[in-house]
Every structure is written in structure tokens, then in C-alpha cells.
Amino acid sequence: MQESELIAELKAGRESAFRILVETYQDKVYNIALVIVQQPEEAEDIAQEVFIEVYQTVRQFREEARLTTWLYRITTSKALAHHRKRKARKRFSILTSLFGLNNEVLHHPPDFHHPGVSLEQKEEMKTLFKAIDQLADTQKVAFILHYIEEQSHREIADVLEVSVSAVESLLHRAKQNLRKQLAPYYKERRNP
């Protein structure tokens, strides 16, 4: 089914079109959310929220961008919002633990497991995803969409609503920042 046909069917409220949309894009939406929030359960919740929002608002979709662009925009925005809330809760729990009876930290981030990572790559990917998590939001989204989801600079520009040159700049800064963050890790691995 062509994208324009799918959009028309979605706007008409056809359940079969919504099923096609979910089946076609659920893995991509989940994977983008997972790389941003780094928690599988949270990524699943975000994916559900994305499709609920699409279902509820598809009639307002103006088709100025591609459907995938709209989905990625919703996904990254929801994932970043969840991530910010979790970071704020984590900071608050650490602060409150300073005044607790036993001074224990109440929140420890779980280990991150991405379904596409083999056991032997787990430690490297954990380090990489931790470094990606430290990037500024726009750099993080640009990096994930380009290097993980293999989106073109034009597609990323549409998702972020910026120019292609801005995307190129974001990717360049993201790579520089990752090199700085990962340099000690790779130096340590070369000189054990």
C-alpha cells in the first residue's frame, strides 16, 4: 500500500490501516525509543504512546512531511520527554537519599540491553550507549537516526525541523563529543 493510500485509510478511521501502520513501523519506533531511554519497558510504553497519538491525531496530519518523518518526530519527542523526567526523578532520589536514614541511593540505573547486541559486544555497546546518552538531545537524535536507523540527512532535517547543514553540524559535533568521551575507554582497552 502506498504511503498516501495508507494516510487516506488512516484518516478514514480504517482499523486495518492502523494495523498495517503498527506492523510496518513498530520495530523502528521501539528501537529509536530504546536507544534514547535505554530501558526496554519504557521503550515499549513510548511506542504504544506514539501509536495512540498517531491514531488520535492522524486527521490533523497535514502531509507536509512523510509519514515516517512524522512518526520519528513523535517518537523522539516522547522518548526525550520520558528520558528527561527519569533523569529529574533520579536526581531527586539521589538528593533525597542524602538526607535519608542510611544515606543510601534510592535509584540505580538498570543495565542497558539492546536486542540487536551480541554478548561479546555487550560491554562495548553499553559504553557506546552511555556515551550517546551524554550527547545534547538534538545531537543524540541526529546520531541515532543517521547511524542506527540509517536515515538520510534530509530525512533527519525533516524530523528535527532544521536545515540539512544543521544536521551535518549536529552529526559532526556528536562524533567529536563521542570521540572525546570514548577515547579513555579505547586507550584503556589497547593498554590493559
Image: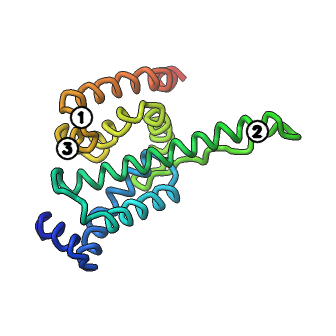
Crowd class of label 2 (few under 14; some 14 to 19; many from 20; radius 10 Å) = some
Q: Position of residue 64 (x, y in %)?
A: 16, 51
Tell whether label 1 touches label 2 (CB within 8 Å): no
Whether residue 66 sits left or right of residue 29 in the image: it is: left
Q: Residue 104 versus residue 50: which sits nearer the camera? A: 50
**Could you tell me which quadrant the N terminus lies in?**
bottom left
For the residue labelled by badge 3, is the local secondary structure a helix, a strand or a loop? Answer: helix
The label shown at residue 155 is 3
Q: Residue 57 versus residue 166: which sits nearer the camera? A: 57
Instruction: Give the Cα separation between the discs numbered 2 and 1.
Output: 39 Å
Q: Quadrant of residue 159?
A: top left
The furthest residue to the front: 60
- Which residue matches tag 1? 162
- Which residue matches tag 2? 96
- Residue at left offset 31%, top offset 49%: 73
For the residue labelled by badge 2, is the local secondary structure a helix, a strand or a loop? Answer: helix
Crowd class of label 1 (few under 14; some 14 to 19; many from 20; radius 10 Å) = few
Crowd class of label 3 (few under 14; some 14 to 19; many from 20; radius 10 Å) = many
Point out the tag, 3 or 1, that comes first from the N-terminus.
Answer: 3
The furthest residue to the right: 101
Instruction: Give the Cα separation between the discs numbered 3 and 2.
Output: 42 Å
- Residue at left offset 17%, top offset 54%: 66
Point out the tag, 3 or 2, that comes first from the N-terminus.
Answer: 2
For the residue labelled by badge 1, is the local secondary structure a helix, a strand or a loop? Answer: loop
Q: Amino acid at mark 1?
A: Val
Whether residue 43 sits left or right of residue 8 in the image: it is: right
Q: Is residue 120 visible?
A: no
- Residue at left offset 12%, top offset 69%: 5
Whether residue 11 sits left or right of residue 192 in the image: it is: left
